[in-house]
Image (cartoon, rainbow, N blue to C red):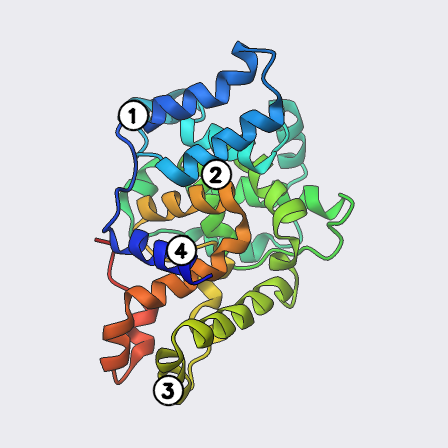
Amino acid sequence: VLKMLSELAECFDGSRPRCEENSVSMVQHALKAPSIDPGIKISAALFSLRQLVLNKGLQATPDDEMRELRESARTTTRGSMWKVLLGAPHVTCEEYLALVGRGPSAFHSKIADDAFRTFASDRAFTAAVTQEQLVRVLNAVMHHVGHSPGGEDIVYVQGMNGVCGALLCSMNEMDAFACLSALALRHCPLYFTKCLDGVQRACELVDAALAAVDPELAAHLRAKELDAKIYALPWILSLGSSVPPLSEASRLLDLLFAGGVHLTVPCAVARLARLRGRLLAADRPMALLRRPPPPS
């Protein structure tokens, strides 16, 4: 655990290489490997892809891919990678439109309110993703999970809008719908319950991990009456997308989708480790935790 936190803290501090310059082409090759060589097992190809993402990283999406996403709804390499890592099913346009055609879900009013606020100050996001897209995808997801096995207790919660927005920056609506549905039904269903059961447990683990690896910082935050349910819950619930810039949130999703959503816990502690000196010196550390400085 200590080694993992140390490595993650270095990544957040920008002191390690972030990604290979040719990482997009490497990921493209990994995605196509099973179709190029039928002898390669899917499990082996998926393992190689995960290792590539975790060890090499993926550079920012090229401009030509972003242009194709806007003009022809073609999912980017990063989006295709996310879909494979999450095991998201293929969704046809007809299937997606049938869900959209059901109209507003039971959570529409909350969805519409949150869509208005999603990355509102990020000009690149607002130029690429519309509120209408967010509303359509989120309502479709809620229609779908409500009638899926295991989805009975899943509700719309604030934070899903940020994840959906990050997905739409790299993929079309059908793929974003498939990935968000996979997250809700398979990867972190307890994150999206009425009482946020999974997020509450994750916050408890953040407190326990911080106390184990940095007792001084943990005691300082406790003295300020700050526990992870206060400062880390929005970040964990949104899978890190609640903290700008969006480009960094996308790279964090690379890590979470490749290594597992449970990595939100050590990542949350790594963020604290990076801010350690400033947090210990701050009279009001919550202000720093609410809007931390951007990565180096």
Q: Nearer the viewer, mark 2 or mark 3?
A: 3
**How many labels, in total?**
4
130 sits to left or right of 31: left
Image quadrant in which you'd find residue 280: bottom left
Between the residue at mark 2 and the residue at mark 3, the CA separation in whole angstroms equals 41 Å
| Residue 109 location (% of width, % of height) | 56, 56
**Residue at point 64% right, 66% down?**
197
Identified by mark 3, the residue type is Lys
Label drawn at residue 186: none
Image quadrant in which you'd find residue 3: bottom left
Badge 2: few (under 14), some or many (20 or more) residues near its Cα, within 10 Å?
A: some
Label drawn at residue 133: 2
Badge 3: few (under 14), some or many (20 or more) residues near its Cα, within 10 Å?
A: few
Between the residue at mark 2 and the residue at mark 1, the CA separation in whole angstroms equals 31 Å
Badge 1: few (under 14), some or many (20 or more) residues near its Cα, within 10 Å?
A: few
Q: Nearer the viewer, mark 3 or mark 1?
A: 1
Identified by mark 1, the residue type is Asn
Between the residue at mark 3 and the residue at mark 4, the CA separation in whole angstroms equals 29 Å
93 sits to left or right of 65: right
Q: Tag 1 or tag 4, which sits nearer the N-term?
A: 1
Identified by mark 2, the residue type is Gln
Between the residue at mark 4 and the residue at mark 2, the CA separation in whole angstroms equals 14 Å
Q: Nearer the viewer, mark 4 or mark 1?
A: 1
Q: Tag 1 or tag 2, which sits nearer the N-term?
A: 1
Q: Which residue is mark 3?
A: 224
**Residue at point 39% right, 85% down?**
219
Between the residue at mark 4 and the residue at mark 1, the CA separation in whole angstroms equals 35 Å
Label drawn at residue 22: 1
